[in-house]
Image (cartoon, rainbow, N blue to C red):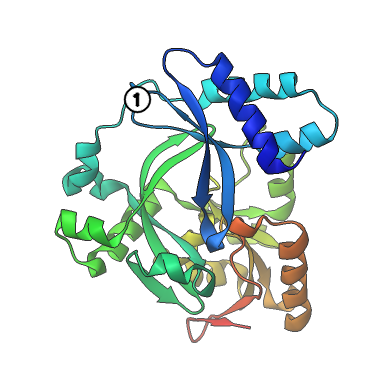
């Protein structure tokens, strides 16, 4: 059974189980890098927020001979854990005073998102772009966000150049930058319930002895954006005590490598390309090459 057929079957099964006018339907979404994903959107007529559940992992379980009944049961259970009980007040989204302290930003690849960038305010950063969104809510299972589009600026009666300084200030408060050792990052992925890794930005310089570090934010979502927090690149250089390479792990984090411990740049570029091809979902890829920060010039560059 192909994925599209699987979606149709799950949709039918869920509609037989959902009550109170709640319905399931197949939904197509264009994600980062133009990636098209299809999932099940579940709509409650009494609530104006409808979660979309992407079923690729469930489909993989089905292909591994797990029963459809068991899978639908788990999808229903997941919906119960993420559904909203109350509607959002959409008037607040149109009220700049209500959202201005929640405006933050993320970084995406420019060329892969040309169609999107034609519709949203953005700032160019080498071959990347900074785009802005409203962080509406942070939950255990994810975040609720709203991408800021050109029409929002008209509704809010603000200029595009007002967004970046505001988003920097908010980001540092809501999504503070963290530098972690690679070892502790791997341990956190393996056991998310364990104690959170140390944030080395809050540690003394002596702890910076490893060859590889991870730069992200406190919620591990679109953490690559924190590289543009004011003074962050300079602070990392001071803590490492040298120039350093910046490898795009995904839109959620960077890998930092001191220059003295790095490989040949071309080899590192090949590593990034191979990891993107085999380990990173297309919609989460940032770029296919490394970057370099030179301390004396205070300059970020492509390598």
The quadrant of the rendering that contains the C terminus is bottom right
Q: Which residue: 67% across, 32% down?
A: 194
Residue 181 percent across, percent down from the top left: 68, 54
In which quarter of the view is residue 132 placed?
bottom left
Is residue 70 something that shows in the picture? yes
Q: Classify mark 1: residues with Cα within 10 Å, few (<14), some (14-19) or many (20+).
A: some
Residue 180 percent across, percent down from the top left: 63, 53
190 or 66: nearer the eye? 66
83 or 163: nearer the eye? 83
**Vertical side of 127 occupied by 151: above or below:** above
**Vertical side of 162 occupied by 52: above or below:** above
Is residue 199 something that shows in the picture? no
| Residue that lies at the very extreme toward the left in this rendered image | 157
Residue occupied by mark 1:
47
| Residue that lies at the very extreme toward the right in this rendered image | 65
Q: Is residue 267 left or right of residue 109?
A: right
Residue 59 percent across, percent down from the top left: 73, 36
Residue 7 percent across, percent down from the top left: 64, 36
Q: Which residue: 50% across, 65% down?
A: 108
Which SS class for mark 1?
Answer: loop
**Vertical side of 83 occupied by 251: above or below:** below
Q: Which residue: 31% across, 65% down?
A: 164
């Amino acid at each position: 059974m192909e994925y599209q057929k699987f979606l149709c079957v799950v949709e039918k099964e869920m509609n037989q189980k959902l009550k109170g006018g709640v319905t399931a339907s197949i939904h197509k979404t264009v994600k980062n890098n133009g990636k098209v994903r299809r999932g099940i959107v579940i709509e409650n007529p009494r609530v104006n927020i409808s979660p979309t559940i992407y079923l690729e992992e469930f489909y993989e379980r089905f292909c591994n001979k797990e029963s459809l009944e068991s899978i639908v049961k788990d999808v229903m259970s997941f919906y119960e854990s993420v559904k909203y009980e109350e509607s959002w007040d959409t008037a607040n989204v149109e009220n700049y005073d209500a959202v201005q302290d929640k405006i933050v930003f993320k970084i995406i690849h420019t060329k892969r998102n040309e169609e999107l960038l034609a519709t949203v305010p953005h700032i160019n950063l080498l071959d990347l772009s900074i785009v802005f969104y409203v962080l509406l809510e942070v939950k255990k299972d994810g975040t609720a966000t709203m991408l800021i589009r050109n029409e929002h600026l008209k509704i809010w009666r603000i200029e595009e150049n007002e967004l970046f300084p505001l988003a920097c200030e908010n980001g540092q408060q809501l999504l503070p930058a963290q530098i972690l050792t690679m070892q502790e990052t791997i341990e956190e992925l393996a056991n998310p319930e364990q104690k959170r890794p140390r944030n080395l930005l809050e540690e003394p310089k002596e702890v910076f002895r490893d060859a590889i570090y991870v730069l992200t934010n406190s919620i591990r979502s679109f953490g690559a954006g924190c590289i543009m927090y004011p003074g962050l690149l300079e602070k990392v250089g001071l803590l490492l005590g040298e120039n350093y390479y910046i490898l795009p792990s995904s839109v959620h984090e960077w890998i930092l490598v001191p220059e003295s411990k790095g490989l040949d740049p071309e080899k590192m570029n090949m590593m990034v390309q191979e990891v993107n091809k085999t380990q990173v979902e297309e919609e989460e890829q940032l770029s296919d090459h490394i970057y370099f920060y030179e301390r004396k010039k205070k300059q970020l560059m492509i390598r």
